[in-house]
Amino acid sequence: MKQTIAASMIGRLPIGITGLAILLLVQAATDSFSKGGAAAACYVIGLATIAPALGRLIDRIGPRLVLRVCSITFPAALLGLVTAVETRSHPALILIFAAAAGATFPPITVCMRTYFRQRLNDDALLATAYSLESVLIELIFIVGPMLVALFVAAASPATAVLFAAASGCIGTLLFLRSPPLRSWKIEPRATASVLGPLGRPGFVVLIAIILCYSTAFGLLEIGMTAYATERGNAALAGVLLGLMSTGSAFGGIAYGSRSWHLPLARQFALMLAFMGAGLMVLTLPWTPWPFAFWSLFAGVVMAPALIIQSMLVAKAARPDEITEAFTWSASALLSGVGIGIAAGGGLLEHFSSPAVLAAGSAAALTAAAAAFMRSD
């Protein structure tokens, strides 16, 4: 399992690097947050659009072929993106390469979550496994933005993008050799359905809530980047996002270390409400040190929200559709991030960072209200 975790960490490092690095790469070349946000949003939306199809394919044939193809096409797309930006190619080509990179991102995370769901029948063990997985993701979000800050300060955003390409390729190839893929279980198909898990109304409502609150993540990412830029230090964005992920990792550890008696759906609503309140605090006129402290504090509920989301998806999906269900939730999450980044870029053309962070707070509170109504 240590080999599996190490390989998955390397292969998923781009999760914490690529969106921010693309944003800064294009922003530096065009001097426009709107264009940088559009490129980052295309990357995320490209991933979100194709991921459910990859998930359905993995449910039917297993993950090996999908991961092999992605280990080649993902770094190739990022290399094309860097080349297009540095040669001042047509903006449409830049957006196409960004979307292609997202569409070919190796689906290691959904493979891990599906494997846990296949092997663990006890809810408490499953919650612990998803808590561990969430903490690992948060560590990636801590290390990733800090690596971006390091690359931007020492070299360029292009270097960060190329590093993401290399780690995605190497990590995926290592993950292909791990035990979970050798013992992967392909569930027999119960019934054929074009919509898959989307054919169940309760699952659709859950996906809509995920889409809404993840928009806050995208607004937060570009809002923090703008905050750092407004203070004359773009590299500070990586540090701030890393601190928020640190708080989230601590929250994930705390959540997974004990049993909770409140129903999952009600827990989900409360975590989203706390998230919205935390983002609202960040809209106040803080100097960098207090802002950094509140970033750490505001992140505490983020990992628990993601853990609860995974538990709700695992409960809602049939065994033969579990990977596709996880990719739909991941697609909603990433689509929301892309929408938030694009919306934040548009807001920054007319307003400053507090307006973007306030919009993120509103998105999280709206999702909390919807989750509360769903839990009744």
Image (cartoon, helix red, strand yellow):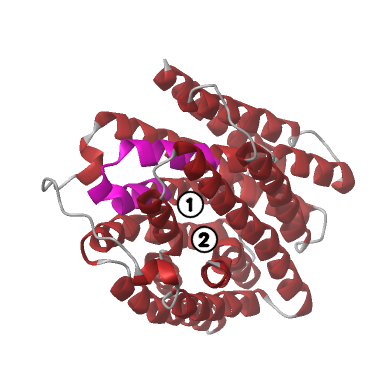
Q: How crowded is mark 2: few (under 14 residues within 10 Å), some or many (20 or more)?
A: many
Q: Could you tell me how far apart the alpha carbons at marks 2 and 1 are, in whole angstroms?
A: 7 Å
Task: Say the numbered circle drawn on residue 251.
Answer: none
Residue 130 percent across, percent down from the top left: 51, 47
Read off the magenta span.
306-330
Q: Residues within 10 Å of mark 1 (few under 14, many from 20)?
A: many
Residue 14, quarter of the rendered image: bottom right
Q: Mark 1 and mark 2 in contact (Cβ < 8 Å)?
A: yes
Quarter of the image with the C terminus in it? top left
Q: Nearer the viewer, residue 35 or 97?
A: 97
Note whether 350 is above or below 4 in the view shown: above
- According to the picture, the residue beneath numbered tag 1 turns out to be 338
- According to the picture, the residue beneath numbered tag 2 turns out to be 40
Residue at (38, 33) in percent of width and height:
206
Q: Which of 52 and 125 is in front in this view?
A: 125
Q: What element carries label 2?
A: helix
Question: In the image, what residue type sits under mark 1?
Answer: Gly
Residue at (76, 64) in percent of width and height:
235
Mark 2 / mark 1, whichever is N-terminal: 2
